[in-house]
Image (tube, rainbow, N blue to C red):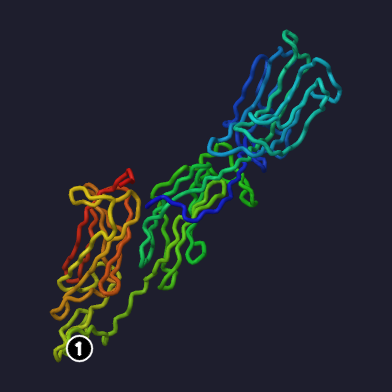
């Protein structure tokens, strides 16, 4: 499987919340950094950030200067933005204390909400800017958000009155333009029963959130990739709200996704796998037509396989075993079964080979690119009436993988018209691949192909 993103859609914006979420959810102070100098004090108030709230006064964090506060003293709370994304806005619920509308010359007390690129809002006792109380939202940029109170009087002159800023919630809106990438293994056509898909995906932004499987445009499976630590705080609206510091996974490897095909009619169906990241970006990492063949063809007693020029034919014997014909003709074909060993195939012969050019060969062994899909093709034939003919269509050929001392049977493939056998495989590591047909009469035909998988990916 080669990681790719053949079709993408951008959501790309999320708000990362600290202390409390958009609905008052308790988020704690783990991602907030307190910073003080001189007489500055950082603390929590009320229930802090560890209990849900419905109003600002019920709990949050505080940055304060007591009385008196030495010149140069400060107190601040800072929220850092992840490096993989870009800050585009700030939303906060805050209130200030100690700032009135009457100017106080040389008082030197100030409040500011800032980023490294911008001053979002500010207050000064010298200017008489007045108090702030409630919520605000604004566009901005930078790598962090800081709320600070400062004593900026001349040297050796203390600030004579207390000031503080309380924060009940803080949200940093970020832009994430990194779409997820991925690939899917285990897609087998024709498909019988349950398709055991294996998803590999990565994301360089906020991380992976979800994978969806669709058949013919209808949703059949949803896999939560992020878990509780990456849960959406506002799942009922169109915004993406996450806990700041949410640990959404950067990658998943060989995640099993079972897909039941037994509810589908036999025939061709469109299979899609879509991966979404935590910011709402999506990639379609698989989009293929899969033939479903859950209903095995019924072989009537009058069905025969005419071979040669004698013109006569014989009906299948009891149990579907081939029987000799009369009048110079040949026998009928045995019935096809749904699993290895249910088809009688006299003196089976199986040929299989890699039908694509490998990266190179090492001592006669093909070197393949890691996780890239390669096609293996061949043919299965049987002896009927003294002549070698193609095996019945839909006869099952097993695929086994041996890595070291461990052998695992993977989903097999089936014979197509004219005895053709095709398998499209992708592997993360070197192994011995064995294609095996086991006849109902105990005969076995198999082909072993050893491959070396290159982790460097180059030729």
Residue found 66% across the figure and 14% down from its top: 38
Image: 206 above or below 282:
above
User: Judging from the image, what secondary structure is the residue with disc 1 in?
Assistant: loop
Residue at the top extreme of this rendering: 156
In this rendering, would 360 be left or right of 195?
left
Residue found 71% across the figure and 13% down from its top: 71
Give the x, y percent position of residue 458.
32, 45
Q: Quadrant of residue 347?
A: bottom left
Give the x, y percent position of residue 114.
68, 29
Q: Quadrant of residue 189?
A: bottom left
> On the image, numbered disc 1 is attached to which residue?
313
Image: 285 above or below 52:
below
In this rendering, would 179 be left or right of 304?
right
Residue at the right extreme of this rendering: 102
* Mark 1 surroundings within 10 Å by alpha-carbon count, few (fewer than 14), some (14 through 19), many (20 or more): many
Give the x, y percent position of residue 34.
61, 24
Viewer-closest of 410 and 429: 429
In this rendering, would 108 be left or right of 410?
right
Residue found 57% across the figure and 46% down from its top: 279
Image label count: 1
Give the x, y percent position of residue 244.
58, 37
Viewer-closest of 364 and 310: 364
Viewer-closest of 193 and 305: 305
């Amino acid at each position: 499987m080669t990681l790719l993103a053949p079709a993408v859609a951008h959501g790309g914006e999320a708000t990362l919340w600290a202390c409390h979420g958009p609905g008052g959810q308790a988020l704690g102070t783990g991602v907030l950094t307190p910073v003080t100098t001189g007489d500055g004090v950082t603390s929590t108030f009320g229930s802090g950030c560890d209990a849900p709230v419905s109003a600002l006064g019920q709990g949050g964090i505080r940055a304060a200067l007591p009385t008196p506060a030495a010149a140069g003293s400060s107190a601040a709370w800072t929220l850092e933005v992840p490096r993989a994304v870009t800050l585009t806005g700030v939303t906060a619920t805050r209130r200030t204390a100690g700032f009135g509308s009457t100017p106080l010359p040389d008082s030197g007390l100030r409040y500011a909400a800032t980023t490294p690129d911008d001053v979002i809002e500010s207050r000064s006792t010298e200017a008489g800017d007045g108090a702030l109380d409630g919520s605000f939202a604004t566009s901005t940029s930078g790598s962090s958000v800081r709320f600070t109170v400062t004593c900026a009087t001349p040297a050796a002159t203390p600030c004579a009155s207390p000031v503080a800023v309380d924060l009940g919630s803080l949200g940093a809106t970020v832009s994430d333009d990194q779409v997820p990438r991925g690939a899917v293994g285990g897609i087998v056509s024709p498909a019988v029963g349950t398709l055991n898909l294996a998803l590999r995906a990565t994301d360089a932004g906020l991380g992976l959130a979800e994978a969806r499987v669709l058949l013919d445009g209808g949703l059949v499976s949803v896999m939560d990739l992020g878990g509780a630590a990456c849960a959406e705080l506002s799942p009922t609206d169109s915004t993406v709200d996450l806990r700041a510091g949410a640990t959404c996974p950067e990658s998943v490897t060989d995640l099993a996704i079972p897909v039941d095909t037994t509810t589908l009619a036999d025939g061709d169906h469109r299979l899609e796998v879509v991966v979404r990241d935590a910011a709402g970006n999506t990639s379609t990492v698989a989009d293929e037509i899969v033939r479903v063949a859950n209903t095995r063809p019924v072989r009537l007693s009058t069905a025969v396989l005419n071979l040669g020029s004698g013109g006569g034919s014989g009906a299948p014997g009891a149990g579907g075993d081939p029987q000799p014909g009369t009048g110079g003709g040949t026998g009928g074909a045995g019935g096809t079964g749904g699993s290895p060993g249910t088809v009688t195939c006299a003196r089976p012969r199986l040929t299989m080979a890699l039908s694509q050019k490998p990266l190179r060969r090492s001592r006669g062994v093909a070197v393949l690119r890691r996780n890239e899909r390669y096609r293996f093709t061949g043919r299965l034939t049987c002896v009927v009436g003294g002549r070698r003919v193609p095996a019945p269509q839909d006869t099952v050929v097993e695929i086994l993988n041996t890595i070291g001392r461990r052998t695992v049977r993977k989903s097999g493939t089936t014979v197509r018209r004219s005895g053709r056998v095709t398998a499209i495989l992708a592997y993360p590591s070197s192994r011995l691949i064995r294609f095996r047909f086991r006849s109902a009469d105990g005969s076995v035909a198999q082909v072993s192909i050893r491959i070396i998988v290159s982790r460097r990916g180059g030729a």
